[in-house]
Amino acid sequence: MLKRGFKVMMAEANAVIESVSVQDAAYLLDDPDVLFVDVRETVERETDGCIPGSIHAPRGMLEFAADPECPAYNPAFTLDRRLLLYCGTGGRSVLGAKTLLDMGYPEVASLAGGYAAWVAANKKQP
């Protein structure tokens, strides 16, 4: 048996990560102090679209994209911006947000329900 399975990891992450509703996230789209980060796989982003203005940092590469000492660092990641992560339905973004919090990013949140909730709320831009 695993010492810490995904259920435990999700519960730990949800206990410390802010969850932002789709309705609240829509108000943050034009805020220059908020960075929307799509942690889905490339094929998901290409096939299903994305939240306008978001950057892409797949969950498997998130730590590399967020670390200034890494050659794969994306300079959009800064400590003075609020990071709002999203994935397909919310699981990967919660775990990714917890990782960024552990790395030292002070303001990290996850989009409740992920991109599926965004689309369902008709927030997807054509």
Image (cartoon, rainbow, N blue to C red):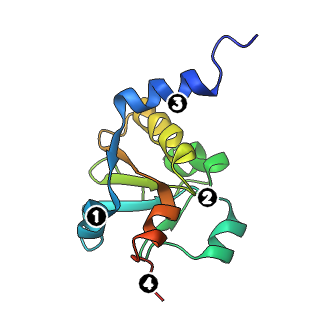
**Circle 1: element type:** helix
Query: Which of the two labelled residues, at mark 3 and mark 1, occupies the earlier sequence position?
Result: 3
Q: Residues within 10 Å of mark 1 (few under 14, many from 20)?
A: some
Residue 69, position as x, y percentages in the image: 53, 43
Out of 67 and 82, give the one closest to the viewer. Answer: 82
- Residue that mark 2 sits on: 40
- Relative to 11, say whether 46 is above or below: below
The N terminus lies in which quarter of the figure?
A: top right
Residue with the mark numbered 1: 23
Q: CA distance from mark 1 to mark 2?
A: 21 Å
Q: Residue at x 37, y 27 (%)?
A: 15
Front-most of residues 110 and 64: 110
Alpha carbon distance from label 4 to label 1? 15 Å
Contact (CB < 8 A) between labels 1 and 2?
A: no
Report which residue position mark 4 lands on.
Answer: 125
Residue holding disc 3: 10
Disc with the residue nearer the chain's start (2 vs 4) = 2
Q: Is residue 90 visible?
A: yes
Q: Earlier in the sequence, mark 4 or mark 3?
A: 3
Residue at position x 46%, y 59% in the image: 37
Among the two numbered marks 1 and 2 on one chain, the one whose residue lies closer to the N terminus: 1
Which amino acid, mark 4?
Gln
The x, y position of residue 36, in whole percent, is 40, 62
Which residue type carries mark 3? Answer: Met
Q: Is residue 81 left or right of residue 103?
A: left
Going 58% across and 57% down the picture, which residue do you hit?
88
- The three-letter code of the residue at mark 1 reads Gln
